[in-house]
Image (cartoon, rainbow, N blue to C red):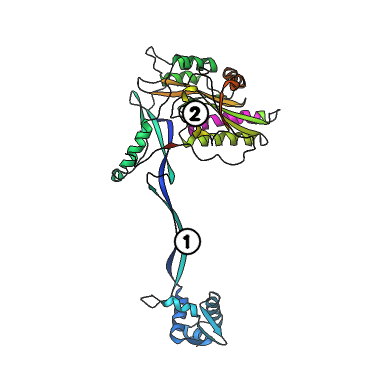
Amino acid sequence: MAIAPYVEPITVCTYGFNVPCRRFLISANVTRDRRLPVVDEFVLRTLKLCESVPVKRLGAYFGFSNSETDAVVGDLVNRGFVIVDGDSASLHPSAQQMFRGADDGMPRVQEIDPWVDRLWFAVPERFGSVVLKGREELIFDPQPHLRPHLLEVEVENILRYRPLTTALTDAYRLLTGPDPSAAGLAEFTRMVTNTTVTDAHNPDGLFDLSNWLSANLSMAGSERHTLIGASYLQRNIEFFAPLLERRAAASSGTSVPREIQILWYRPGGSGWGTSPDLQEALTALKAILRRAMPKIAVRTALVIPQVAKRDNPRRFERVFDEAYVTPAGHMSPSIEVLLVGDIGAIVLVRVMLSQAVSAFVGYALADSVAVERIRRNLSWDTIVSRSEELWSRPRIREEDDLPPEVLLETDPDEN
């Protein structure tokens, strides 16, 4: 069974741009005039004209019964509009203010509503920032190409946002990704013991996405799922989540360690992880583990290839508990592995879709044998002693959400 080429675009990467802004907090009280009910209004107007009127006479004037008179006057007394002295009713001094500024002479009540809002103005100084999200789509029409969506505004606002659009585009163009390689493909195949990614390449070395998906239809099972694009995309995490939940729930009844490590082998390229989706993915993975095993600690580690050391790895310091740079040649920078304890894993490899376009493809796995094989191939227990430690936070029980996002910095006024 063949799968037809994609018609709809496929999101393969997302971005988050930190646009520098000055932040202003505006706090004000807004007053609004409100008309009174007709009965109350006319009683107050009568008292305004007559100053003091016997209560019974006031009721007789409006045709009220004794009980109706008591109800109307009592309500106005309780609201502070009228005072009753003996048998006579008169306006409370504060009610005199209700007649000021009314062109028609009718009393009105002023209501005060608090109003709080925040405004952001883009300026080059680093007073603060606002996050703009972008994405990159893979399109087949019929040849594959990438289409970025960085700032979508109405046509009539294009000129207003042109400096910001230019800055976002410049920042996007500076991002890099790893180059596909034969060594990375061979390493991926060995790690997942599945040749379908290799087999889906044509004689020109280009990857046929439809053929690969078709080949995996017969292999689809409850412990494996095909993935396209960055590992931390919401779509890919949603595919991984049910596999992980089932394995985690099954493991909760057995002997479990006191701590589970989320080990993230990132690929090369400056574009990796510059997205709010990375933090959201870690939050989702932690939540799954803590639901299945409430008493277990979860610790995150980022493993960086040598070629990515120059791409400012410290920007992830508030996201991962620890980080290391592996020795040169430990693993191909065109491979990415997310290993969640001995429960599940995501393994991706960069493939060439055309001479100018490449993307990640791979699998989410929760098979115990497959996960153990991936762990052995990574040999992290051996490699960690030869890796350069960048940071390591003390081991504490984490109950709070993840810290602020790691995003792209751009200056809309730079050009």
Residue drawn at (44%, 75%), measured in percent from left and top? 38
Q: Secondary structure at mark 1?
A: strand
Mark 1 residue type = Pro
Residue drawn at (50%, 87%), measured in percent from left and top? 53
Q: Which residues are magenta?
A: 231-250
**Quadrant in which residue 282 is drawn:** top right
Q: Is residue 363 visible?
A: no
In this picture, residue 385 sits left or right of residue 212? right
Residue with the mark numbered 2: 231
Q: Is residue 408 visible?
A: yes
Q: Position of residue 71 (x, y in %)?
A: 55, 77
Which of the labelled discs sits on residue 114, or is there none?
Answer: 1
**Quadrant in which residue 293 is drawn:** top right
Which of the labelled discs sits on residue 222, or is there none?
Answer: none
Mark 2 residue type = Ser
Q: The C terminus appears in which quarter of the rendering?
A: top left
Is the magenta region chiefly helix, strand or loop? helix
Q: Position of residue 371 (x, y in %)?
A: 59, 21
Q: Disc 2 and disc 1: Cα gap in Å?
A: 44 Å
Q: Pointer 2 and pointer 1: residues touching (CB < 8 Å)?
A: no
